[in-house]
Amino acid sequence: MLTITCLGIPAALRHQSRSASVHLAALGRGAGKAKKPDLTEHQQNGDVKDIIKRLQKLGTGPLCDADKGHKLTSSTSDDPDLKKYKGLNLMDTDVMKLRHAPKQSGGVMIGVARTVQLPRPNDFLAVLSALTELSAGDVLVVNTGGSTRAVAGSLFTTEATRRGVNGIVVDGPIRDVAELECFAYSTKITPYAGTVQHVGEGVDVSSVQCAGVTVNPGDIIFGDSDGVLCGSVDTFSACLHDAEHIVAAEQRLIEGMKVGNSLHSMTNFDEHFAARKEGRESSLTFKDLRTVKFTGIDSVEVS
């Protein structure tokens, strides 16, 4: 798919508010000690509620496209505010797989990260304990420390759904895939359950490593059938406007193709291809929507 992002660069990234995501140093397996965030305040923050509402109309693809544009801007700009952009983090899609999506969800999982690090592999008492502290809008993110036994299944996800929890993301195995209730992602599946003997340090005590990325308590977690993204409130906020324009532009292209217009005819493809063939600078633009342009296209190799 062609990559699109909005023309124009935001004047500056929003400064982090006191209720924004928690910054934690990654230590060892990714666990960084930190003061537990006030997640109640965080979830009730008006900006966060608005961000989550707008995210419900998006997907990982447009968000990644917007993120790519912001990262490029951040790397080339002299503006210190733009350089603060940290970027979204995509969990390794080769291992982190969607195991269940509720039919009524619209196919998108969005929520505030609550983190758990298992004290020992194959023991999920800490996960069950964390469940008692979860509330509506949360997404539980678990690092199992290399577990080979399941740490969650149908009972866990049914109780999570009863509490209004939006999902669980596990770096490790889960089970009962055919009977899961809430959104569930994991890197493995096994029918064997672990033990329940080791208490652990509790929920939101540390950041955790999950499928190759660091997840902090209070981060936003966004998942769909293509993968799972995580990032701070400010990072998602910075990407929203561009991602919304990308969705609008792609919809226009799809509508045009459905009534008989070719994709190429709705862009300056011929001019752009010729320019790139000759090594000249060019952007692939959508002819009918001047506020949107296609960027990030690699040089075309023509034999």
Image (cartoon, rainbow, N blue to C red):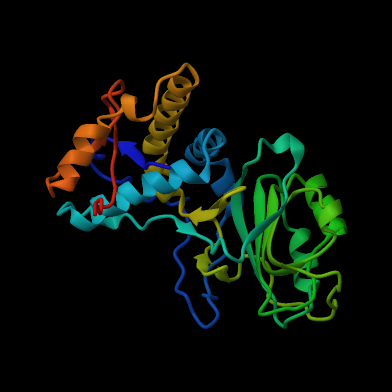
Say which of 202 and 160 sits in front.
160
| 86 versus 117 height, above or below | above
Judged left or right of residue 49, residue 196 is right
**Location of residue 18 in the rendering, given as x and y in whole percent from the top left corner:** 43, 52
Question: What residue occupies the far front of the structure in this picture?
Answer: 303
| Residue occupying image coordinates x 68% and y 74% | 144
The answer to whether any part of residue 282 appears in the image is no
| Residue occupying image coordinates x 69% and y 47% | 166
| 105 versus 193 height, above or below | above
**Location of residue 292 in the rendering, given as x and y in whole percent from the top left corner:** 30, 30
Image quadrant assignment for residue 110: top right
Labels in figure, total = 0
The answer to whether any part of residue 200 appears in the image is yes
Image quadrant assignment for residue 153: bottom right
Image quadrant assignment for residue 88: bottom left
Say which of 189 and 89 sits in front.
189
| 33 versus 229 height, above or below | below
Say which of 123 and 287 sits in front.
287
Question: What residue occupies the far top of the structure in this picture?
Answer: 259
**Location of residue 72 in the rendering, given as x and y in whole percent from the top left corner:** 26, 53
| Residue occupying image coordinates x 24% and y 54% | 303
Judged left or right of residue 192, residue 126 is left
Quadrant the N terminus occupies: top left
**Location of residue 171 in the rendering, given as x and y in whole percent from the top left corner:** 65, 69
| Residue occupying image coordinates x 42% and y 23% | 252
Say which of 11 and 260 sits in front.
260
